[in-house]
Each structure stands twice: as structure tokens, then as C-alpha cells.
Image (cartoon, rainbow, N blue to C red):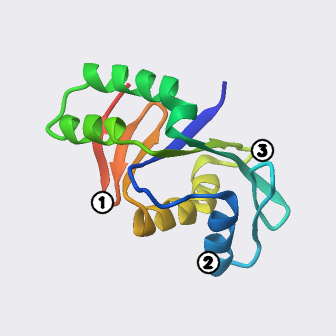
Amino acid sequence: MGYYMRFISTDDREITLSILEQALLKVDPRYSISAVGELRHAKDLYGLIQIDLLDECDEEIAELKEDVEEARGTRRAEVIKTLDEARTMVAVQVLWQGRETEPTLLKIDPLWDWLFSYRTGLQHADGEGYYDRSGLILQVR
């Protein structure tokens, strides 16, 4: 199954693998994203990225909404609104490759930093919940 993290964008602006790669290269020239979405730092593989437009991911959005509707929290309505207005989803299947959790996630963080800086939306992490740029805003199991 795997561990997934997603950025659910409500922004009209395009998000492509090429745009994301250019952003990561500004952080560190050892980053690369292949045409099939392999996220690498140097030669090490950290994740597989898939970018879907709303019509390609509406089933996944519906599943995420079901989980949010069962959650409790003061920012639940904000998360539902983001899911309702979703335009694009950037999903990353995190690949541990025998590494510890924290060092692996730190290599992926620049991707989320750029998305929060240049696109509107929220991040979702499997088994955790929804984040804005300040941190966890809604815990979802």
C-alpha cells in the first residue's frame, strides 16, 4: 500500500513535474524529478510523485472527505472547503529505502515548502491529518 502525502491545491495555476523540479533545483542542485515522477536527491530515491487534476482524482477526494466528516476539530470546515474546491492533487508515495523516517521526510520537505509558498491548499499525510504551513490543523485517523 505505502505511505502517501498529498498537497491538495485549490489554485488555478498549473503544477507540473517540471515546475516542481525547477523549484527543488533552486534549493539543492542534487534534486531531480524524472518524467515518471521519481523524486531523487543525488542518486537516492525518496518518493514517487503523481499529479492529478480534479477530474482524475475525484474518487480519492471523495474518500478523503469521508474521513474528514468523521473527524472532530475546529478547522474541519476549512478542510472540507479545500477538498470541495480542489483543482489539483500532488501525491507523493514516500519510499523509505531502509532509511529512518525523519531523514527521509526532510528530503521531501522542500517540495511542501514550495507548494505552500506558491500555491494555495492543504497538505494531507496518511494516518495523521491535514496541515497548513503552520502545522497540523485537523487530525484524521
Q: CA distance from mark 2 to mark 3?
A: 23 Å
Residue 100 lies, in percent from the top left, at 65, 48
Q: Quadrant of the N terminus?
A: top right
- Alpha-carbon span between mark 1 and mark 2: 20 Å
Residue 67 vs residue 57, the one in the foreground: 57
* Image: 102 above or below 67: below
> In the figure, 106 relative to 84: above or below?
below
Q: Amino acid at mark 2?
A: Val
Expressed as whole percent of the image width and height from the top left, the position of residue 99 reads: 72, 48
Q: Does 55 sit left or right of 124 as displayed?
A: right
| Helix, strand or loop for disc 3 | loop
Amino acid type assigned to the residue bearing label 1 in the image: Ser
Q: Residue at x 42, y 23 (%)?
A: 62
Residue for badge 3: 97
Question: Residue 87 appears at what percent x and percent y?
Answer: 45, 45
Question: Upstream in the sequence, badge 2 or badge 3?
Answer: 2
Identity of the residue drawn at 35% across and 37% down: 83
- N-terminal of the two: label 1 or label 2? 2
Dot placed on the residue nearer the N-terminal end, 3 or 1: 3
Judge the density around disc 2: few (<14), some (14-19), many (≥20) Cα neighbours within 10 Å. Answer: few
Quarter residue 22 falls in: bottom right
Which disc, if any, is residue 27?
2
Q: Quadrant of residue 31?
A: bottom right
Say which residue label 1 marks.
Answer: 134
For the residues labelled 1 and 2, say whether their Cβ atoms are less than 8 Å apart: no
Task: Sort mark 3 into few (<14), some (14-19) or many (20+) by Cα contacts within 10 Å.
Answer: few
Could you tell me which secondary element the residue under label 1 belongs to? loop
Residue depth check, mark 3 versus mark 1: number of the one nearer the observer: 1
Between 135 and 87, the one nearer to me in the picture: 87
Locate the C terminus and report the quarter of the image it occupies. Answer: top left
